[in-house]
Image (tube, helix red, strand yellow):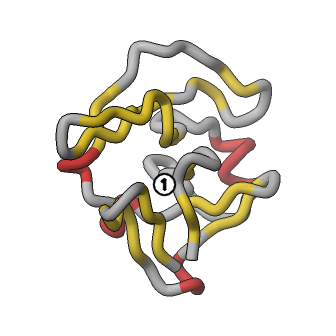
């Protein structure tokens, strides 16, 4: 699967490396082009996955705010519920096309 924003491949990974949680596909950290992501100051905490780190996508002088996110400090209970240590896995907003 690829995550595309405009003409940029933001992430790409085989389907068996992805994790789907609550309808969102999460890419492993090694599959993401971090050069396109900039940390966002937007705060949010999920009731069961913990604090979220949002990222904006920036390329070619354009910005898509808060278009990606991850859970860097996911609690053990959430890891157990998902069945995988998905800390640092990254999901994308609908502004990013998944193909």
The vertical placement of 38 against 51, above or below, is below
Q: Who's the residue at 55% across and 51% down the image?
A: 91
**Coordinates of residue 47 in the picture (x, y in percent):** 78, 25
Q: Quadrant of residue 28?
A: bottom left
- Locate residue 17 relative to residue 6 in the image: left or right: right
Q: Who's the residue at 35% across and 40% down the image?
A: 57
- Locate residue 46 relative to residue 51 in the image: left or right: right
Question: Which of the two residues, 43 or 80, is positioned nearer the viewer here?
Answer: 43
Q: Residues within 10 Å of mark 1 (few under 14, many from 20)?
A: many
Dot 1 falls on a residue whose secondary structure is loop
Q: State the residue position of label 1.
A: 89
Q: Who's the residue at 60% across and 45% down the image?
A: 93
Q: Who's the residue at 57% across and 68% down the image?
A: 98
- Locate residue 29 relative to residue 19 in the image: left or right: left
**Coordinates of residue 15 in the picture (x, y in percent):** 58, 84
Q: Quadrant of residue 80?
A: bottom right
The vertical placement of 90 against 58, above or below, is below
Looking at the rendered image, the quarter that the C terminus falls into is bottom right
- Locate residue 93 relative to residue 64 in the image: left or right: right
Q: Quadrant of residue 46?
A: top right
Question: Which of the two residues, 47 or 26, is positioned nearer the viewer here?
Answer: 26
**Coordinates of residue 74 in the picture (x, y in percent):** 58, 38
**Coordinates of residue 52 in the picture (x, y in percent):** 55, 28
The vertical placement of 36 against 73, above or below, is below
């Amino acid at each position: 699967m690829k995550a595309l924003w405009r003409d940029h491949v933001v992430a790409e990974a085989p389907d068996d490396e992805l994790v789907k949680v609550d309808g969102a596909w999460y890419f492993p950290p090694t599959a993401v082009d971090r050069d396109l992501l900039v940390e966002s100051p937007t705060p949010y905490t999920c009731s069961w996955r913990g604090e979220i780190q949002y990222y904006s996508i920036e390329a070619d002088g354009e910005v898509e705010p808060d278009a990606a996110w991850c859970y860097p400090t996911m609690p053990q209970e959430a890891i157990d519920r998902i069945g995988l240590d998905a800390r640092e896995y990254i999901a994308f907003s609908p502004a990013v096309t998944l193909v």
